[in-house]
Amino acid sequence: MWFIRRVCFVLVFLGLVASAWLKPAPIAAQAPLTGDQTAPLLNPVSEGTQQDFEAGLNTANGAVLYQTASYPGVSFHRRNSTVGYAYYGGGCTYLTALSSGNEDNNALSTRLDIPDGAVILGVEFQYRDTDAVNNSRLYLYRFDGAGGVATVALLNSSGNGGYGSSYTATNLNTLYDAFSYSYSLVWYSGSVGINHALCGARVKYAYNPPVARPFTMPPANQPDALQGGSSGYSFTAASDFVAFEESAAYSYSSAGCMIHTGGANLAAEVDLADGTQLAGYRAYYYNTASGAAMNANLVWIDGSSTNTVLIASTTASSGFANEYFVPPSAQIIDEFSKGYLMYIRPGTSTTTRMCGIRTFYTTPVQAKQLPVYINPVSSVIADHDASGVLLTEQQPESAPIQSLDLGTVEELASPLITNEYQFVTARSFMPRDNVYLVNSAPAGCISFGSDAEVDYTFQLPPNSGLRGIRFYYRNIAGNLGNARYWAFDGRGWYNPIFTYAIPTSTNYASQLVSYTGSHYDLSNGSVAHSLNFSILSPSNTVEFCGARIWYTTGLRSLYIPVAFKN
């Protein structure tokens, strides 16, 4: 008995020692969250893998199809003009310097742009993390324009030695309500430097096209109420308007609101489907300074000229408020000819801050005339190998992008194929690095004060075929400029689909760039599309004036979910 007790004592003692030795190190305590990060989490979220994202729920609320919106790291922008950032590679970006403001001022942001009425099924965070102590975080916020903020999803990186991703494995089933809220994807870095890089985000959603409604007279106090036919909203937080000139000085307040202290305005692309009418827009703001006014102006740009549609000024000074502004003439969206851009100019302190713009669009009021098909005037073939396969800079992973020839007469004449366009103004492009010096130029163009690269990310409808891109420019001195089209997967893979050298031009010019066959996106949203303009040894004689994306889809729908993108 004595021997058995002694053995038991020894075993218990050894067990206690082992448990203490094997016990994991305590998790470092996180600093208390402040500002937007204290917003309530709307849905319980657990984190899964990329496979969870691919295999997750694909339908909701009767919708039978799902789509994916993809955003590379280069599509995120700073919310404070003193924050430093740089390009890491593979579509990723990282912080190089912090502002003196709170953590919300040091975050990078981009607007979540999906159709009004869609159901969010999941969010994936793509990152590079080599920090074993700190994590970076991706939030999906929603703002109501009047100081309200809620967290739709929250995801964390992990110090796994390189590229990784996490996914909200719990089905969110969150309605994207563009009447009530704007939605932003916001990244908080774990530290300054290359240990943390933001490589992208993907959002899976279910969506059914809008159903036409019987006509109803809108209330007098709500002129942008839903009316007959197919109408809807596009809501953008002020914090997702971007600076297109180095002179701009701005900072983040809270709940999607911005402060502006000098330089050029902030801008956002207004990109609605051909033939729809931009009926008006509602500005959301906060103002307690009597006599102070802020601006929300609408212009269009066609690559060689610009025209002011409406200059709108706020009038209230009693706290949070909103006002609806109507263009003086009907604005029928014609993406073949021009693009629309919204400028905002918030106040200079927390007493005068702009919080968001909600655009109201209605059914087409006239038929949209498609331009006659014209063969491309420039064909890019240098980025294909001898067999016509697109070249990539990293060979281990095959490209999810494929080439498909849509150039036959039968396909061009098919009633199942229609030409679509998206005009992107140059002032919606963002520099890849804060040291790049970009300035506004006449005719809605931008000029460059240093070697620079600027990017714009866009979404194509599922299974659409990109036929070509027309670039608008002026290059009097023949500076070395290149226009590029990229694809990124958020995990370090990237595909330089084509490069076009900008020629010398004595006046405003444009060039339609295409290539053998059509670039067809068969990735179902697993890759992000980005346009890029780069310039070496610039002078005042080179200007970039925008791009027009030309693609084919099935039968034309009334609304393509692309609006207020950057």
Image (cartoon, rainbow, N blue to C red):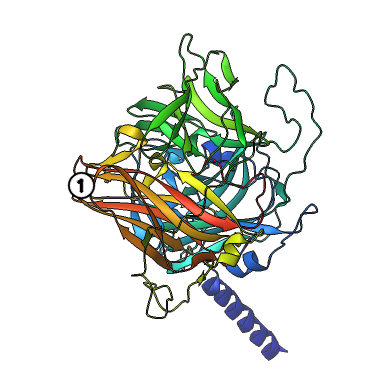
Q: For residue 345, which quarter of the picture?
A: top left
Residue 320 sits above or below residue 117 on the image: above
Q: Quadrant of the N terminus?
A: bottom right
Specify whether residue 97 is in view.
no
Residue located at (47% from left, 12% from top): 289
* 367 relative to 342 in the view: left or right: right
Question: Of residues 188 and 548, which is closer to you in this image?
Answer: 548
Residue 15 sits above or below residue 222 on the image: below
Instruction: Give the residue number, with chain letter if any, for mark 1.
Output: 538
Residue 55 sits above or below residue 212 on the image: below
Specify whether residue 399 is in view.
yes
Question: Of residues 285 and 422, which is closer to you in this image?
Answer: 422
User: Mark 1, residues whose alpha carbon is within 10 Å: few (<14), some, or many (≥20)?
Assistant: many
Q: Secondary structure at mark 1?
A: loop
Residue 145 in picture, x, y percent from top left:
59, 29
Q: For residue 408, which quarter of the picture?
A: bottom right
Question: Of residues 238 and 561, which is closer to you in this image?
Answer: 561
Residue 387 sits above or below residue 339 on the image: below
Residue 489 in picture, x, y percent from top left:
49, 64
Question: Of residues 556 and 321, which is closer to you in this image?
Answer: 556
Residue 111 in picture, x, y percent from top left:
53, 44
Badge 1 amino acid = Pro
Residue located at (47% from left, 44% from top): 423
